[in-house]
Amino acid sequence: MDRVNKAVKLYSEGLSCSQAVLSVFADKFNLDEKTMMKISGGFGGGVGASGLICGALSGAVMVIGLKYGAAAPEDQDAKQKTREEVRGFIKKFNDEFGAIDCRRLIGFDMSKPAEFEYVHNNNITKQICPKFVEFAVRELEKII
């Protein structure tokens, strides 16, 4: 199964969008999927279901960091490369979907308990968010 299909499947099985995106790249970095899932577990729903930056996008930023990120304070080239890649990715995501935050992407404010409950009781994210997961993984494959 390719990464895109695997990520969408993991999302449909109950992982958050950030977990689905990050975990399918575990093999690229010699990390295990469960660790990747745990690291990214708090980013779904726009970071802790706050409605902020999309979890699929957050997962993508983590993958970019794993690929290009600095491992030492003095590694300015890696810091610059990471910033460039993240900014480019955010632009592509925003150009594709018209927003980068969950509130606007799904049309509900997940930070409000009533809206969070409505979204989950009516599978709103399961209908809308797979395209964000798919896009993130597909675009990451071009740069990783």
Image (spheres, helix red, strand yellow):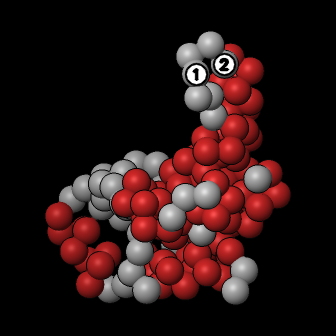
The numbered disc on residue 140 is: none
Instruction: Report if residue 25 is visible in the image.
Output: no
Q: Amino acid at mark 2?
A: Asp
Pointers 2 and 1 in contact (C-beta within 8 Å): yes
71 or 7: nearer the viewer: 71
> Is 112 placed above or below 89 here?
below
Residue 83 coordinates in the image, percent (x, y): 66, 30
The image quadrant that residue 78 belongs to is top right
Residue 2 shown left or right of residue 9 in the figure: right
The numbered disc on residue 75 is: 2
Q: Quadrant of the N terminus?
A: bottom right
Instruction: Report if residue 28 is visible in the image.
Output: yes
137 or 120: nearer the viewer: 137
The image quadrant that residue 88 belongs to is top right
Residue 15 coordinates in the image, percent (x, y): 41, 74
> Is 52 placed above or below 80 here?
below
Q: Residues within 10 Å of mark 2 (few under 14, many from 20)?
A: few
The image quadrant that residue 43 belongs to is bottom left
Q: Amino acid at mark 1?
A: Ala
Residue 47 shown left or right of residue 115 in the figure: right
Residue lying at 48% horizontally and 78% vertically, measured from the top left: 11
Residue 28 coordinates in the image, percent (x, y): 68, 59
Residue lying at 25% horizontally and 68% vertically, measured from the top left: 115
The numbered disc on residue 72 is: 1
Secondary structure type for disc 1:
loop
Extreme residue toward the front, this view? 30
